[in-house]
Image (cartoon, grey):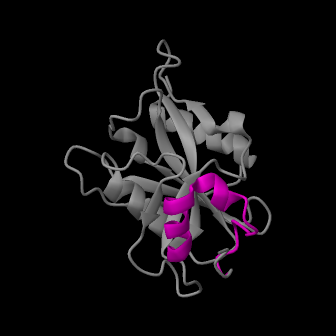
C-alpha cells in the first residue's frame, strides 16, 4: 500500500517522465509537523529550473476545504536560492497563509543576488496542465479524500506586489512580463 508521499512522488515521476530530481530538506519549525522537502529539477521543462514542495499540505488551514496546496516554481535560473525561498515560505507560513491564487508574499529581502525581486505571487502553475495540478494522494480505500492542489509561485518586484494589492492579480497578469525571467525589470 503506497503512502501519501509515495503517491505524490509517483505523480511527479509521471509528469517528469522519470527524470531524477534532487531532494532538498527544510527543517520543520512547527511542532508535530515533519519538515518540508523541495523536489528540484534542472531543465524541466527545457531551460527552466522547476521546484515543488512537499510538506505544506501536512498542515491545516481553515480555507483549505477541498484539498491542500503544495507549491511549484519554474524560473530561468541555475540559482537554488529560488527553490530554497519557496521551500522556506512553505515551511514557515504553513497553517497561517492559505497560498490562494492572488496572494502575494513578501520574502523580506532579495531572493537571489541575480535579481531585485523580493516577493512572490500565487497563481496556477504555467508549466503544468490544470488536470495535472490536482493530485489524489489518498491511501487505498479513501480515494478523493486527500487532495493536493499544486499552486504556482511567481517571483515579483515589490512595486508589482503593491500593484496587485491595488489592482488585482488579473490586471497584473495582463501586463507584458515574462513569468520565468528573474532578471526582468518591473512590469509596471
Residue farthest right in this picture: 46
Name the residue nearer the viewer: 100 or 139: 100
Which residues, given as a range, are shown in magenta? 158-183
- Residue 85 lies, in percent from the top left, at 46, 68
Query: Quick check: 100 above or below 75?
Result: above
The quadrant in which residue 176 appears is: bottom right
Query: Quick check: 63 above or below 157?
Result: above
Residue farthest front in this picture: 166
Query: Quick check: 127 above or below 118?
Result: above
**Res. 119 in view:** yes
- Residue 173 lies, in percent from the top left, at 68, 58
Q: Residue at x 34, y 49 (%)?
A: 94
Residue farthest top in this picture: 141
The quadrant the C terminus occupies is bottom right
- Residue 45 lies, in percent from the top left, at 76, 59
Specify whether 16 is left or right of 37.
right
Q: How many marks?
A: 0
Residue farthest bottom in this picture: 113
- Residue 91 lies, in percent from the top left, at 36, 56
**Res. 25 in view:** no
Q: Residue at x 47, y 27 (%)?
A: 66
Query: Quick check: 23 above or below 140?
Result: below
Q: Residue at x 55, y 84 (%)?
A: 116
Name the residue nearer the viewer: 63 or 82: 63
Q: Residue at x 37, y 61 (%)?
A: 26
Specify whether 186 is left or right of 61.
right
Q: Is residue 166 magenta?
A: yes
Q: Is residue 17 magenta?
A: no
Name the residue nearer the viewer: 128 or 18: 128
Name the residue nearer the viewer: 13 or 121: 121
Amino acid at each position: 500500500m503506497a503512502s501519501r508521499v509515495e503517491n505524490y512522488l509517483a505523480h511527479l515521476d509521471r509528469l517528469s517522465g522519470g527524470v531524477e530530481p534532487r531532494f532538498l530538506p527544510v527543517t520543520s519549525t512547527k511542532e508535530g509537523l515533519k519538515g518540508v522537502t523541495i523536489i528540484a529539477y534542472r531543465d524541466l521543462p527545457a531551460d527552466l529550473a522547476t521546484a515543488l514542495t512537499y510538506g505544506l499540505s501536512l498542515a491545516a488551514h481553515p480555507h483549505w476545504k477541498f484539498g491542500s496546496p503544495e507549491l511549484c516554481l519554474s524560473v530561468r535560473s541555475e540559482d537554488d536560492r529560488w527553490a530554497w525561498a519557496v521551500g522556506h515560505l512553505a515551511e514557515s507560513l504553513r497553517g497561517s497563509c492559505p497560498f490562494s491564487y492572488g496572494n502575494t508574499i513578501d520574502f523580506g529581502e532579495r531572493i537571489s543576488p541575480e535579481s531585485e525581486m523580493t516577493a512572490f505571487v500565487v497563481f496556477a502553475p504555467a508549466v503544468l496542465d490544470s488536470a495535472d495540478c490536482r493530485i489524489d494522494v489518498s491511501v487505498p480505500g479513501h480515494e478523493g479524500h486527500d487532495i493536493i492542489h499544486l499552486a504556482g509561485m511567481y517571483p515579483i518586484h515589490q512595486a508589482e506586489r503593491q500593484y496587485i494589492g491595488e489592482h488585482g492579480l488579473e490586471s497584473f497578469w495582463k501586463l507584458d512580463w515574462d513569468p520565468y525571467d528573474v532578471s526582468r525589470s518591473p512590469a509596471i
